[in-house]
Image (cartoon, grey):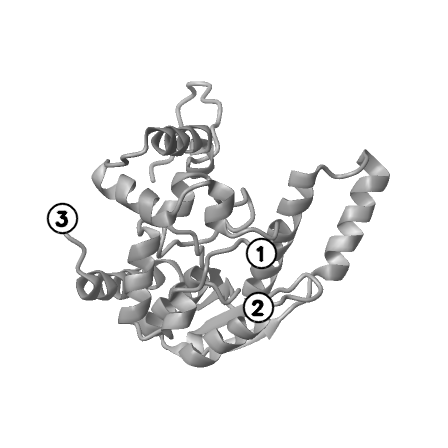
Amino acid sequence: MSFDRREVTQALIQWIRDWFEENGKGCNAVLGISGGKDSTVAAAACAAALGPDRVIGVSMPNGIQPDRDDAVAAAEAIGIKLLTVNIQDAFIGMEKAIAEGCGELSEQARINLPPRLRMSCVYAVSQCNNGRVVNTCNLSEDWVGYSTRYGDSVGDFSPLSQLTVQEVIEVGLELGVPEYLVRKLPSDGLCGQSDEDKLGFTYAVLDRYIRTGVCEDEATKQRIDRLHRINLFKLQLMPSFNPGIKVAIKE
């Protein structure tokens, strides 16, 4: 099936409307806004579906965020409210408390702490504003586990998680998002590297492999397959023990 960006965009807008009708009639869509393509396109899709007055963006720098101007520009382009919560004090406090109670954080734990704090913040803001939290992950990143568990990997609904990076870009352009925002070099803003530098391959290669099964470079193919395999747990519901005891209440 070929990708028709107009058709997919219209279907996405209707899907968001339907989801809110069933799961939060009259509620607001609340999401972290980084100025990257995913949060910007997700916000634009929600604004198209619900109206800009029902979308709240939250900018959450950890001290100084070099590209915060992009978050402001994204919110202004879409016409949504943008709140700012600086998580630096929370990050420093949590880092200090863990160090005192458990020992120094590992580098990976330290990298993943800010996105987990940000998601706690987004949920708090959402609860204060009659909201539902928007997950902003895309299929390409999810496929290779490029998200933080219980950080950016969660939310109440996910408009982009079945779209590849290139497809998200196309939807963003269809929604009228400024091109420089949707084509911005992807970076997690955590470790100082671009996504593609850290992954070791381009999203163009990954997207093609996901949609066609074709990847000419065998080493890259094996790396993608390995990343997908070891990160599948992030995409699945938390396993629970089933004691085999009947539940009498019907859903």
Among numbered discs 1 and 3, the one appearing first in the sequence: 3
Q: How many marks?
A: 3
The image position of residue 38, as x and y in percent, is: 42, 60
Task: Give the residue pinned by disc 3.
Answer: 1
Q: Amino acid at mark 3?
A: Met
Mark 1 and mark 3 in contact? Answer it, CB < 8 Å: no
Task: Judge the density around disc 1: few (<14), some (14-19), many (≥20) Cα neighbours within 10 Å.
Answer: some
Would you say 249 lies left or right of 125 here?
left
- What residue is at 46 percent from the left and 56 percent from the top? 186
| Element at label 2 | loop
- Does residue 70 appear in the picture of this structure? yes
Q: Quadrant of residue 69?
A: bottom right
- Residue lying at the far top in this picture: please name it: 244
Is residue 235 placed above or below 167 in the rendered structure?
above
Q: CA distance from mark 2 to mark 1?
A: 9 Å
Mark 2 and mark 1 in contact? Answer it, CB < 8 Å: yes
Among numbered discs 2 and 1, the one appearing first in the sequence: 2
- What residue is at 14 percent from the left and 52 percent from the top? 2
Q: Nearer the viewer, mark 1 or mark 3?
A: 1
Task: Give the residue pinned by disc 1.
Answer: 189
Mark 3 and mark 2 in contact? Answer it, CB < 8 Å: no
Q: Amino acid at mark 1?
A: Gly
Task: Give the residue pinned by disc 2.
Answer: 67
The image position of residue 230, as x and y in percent, is: 46, 28
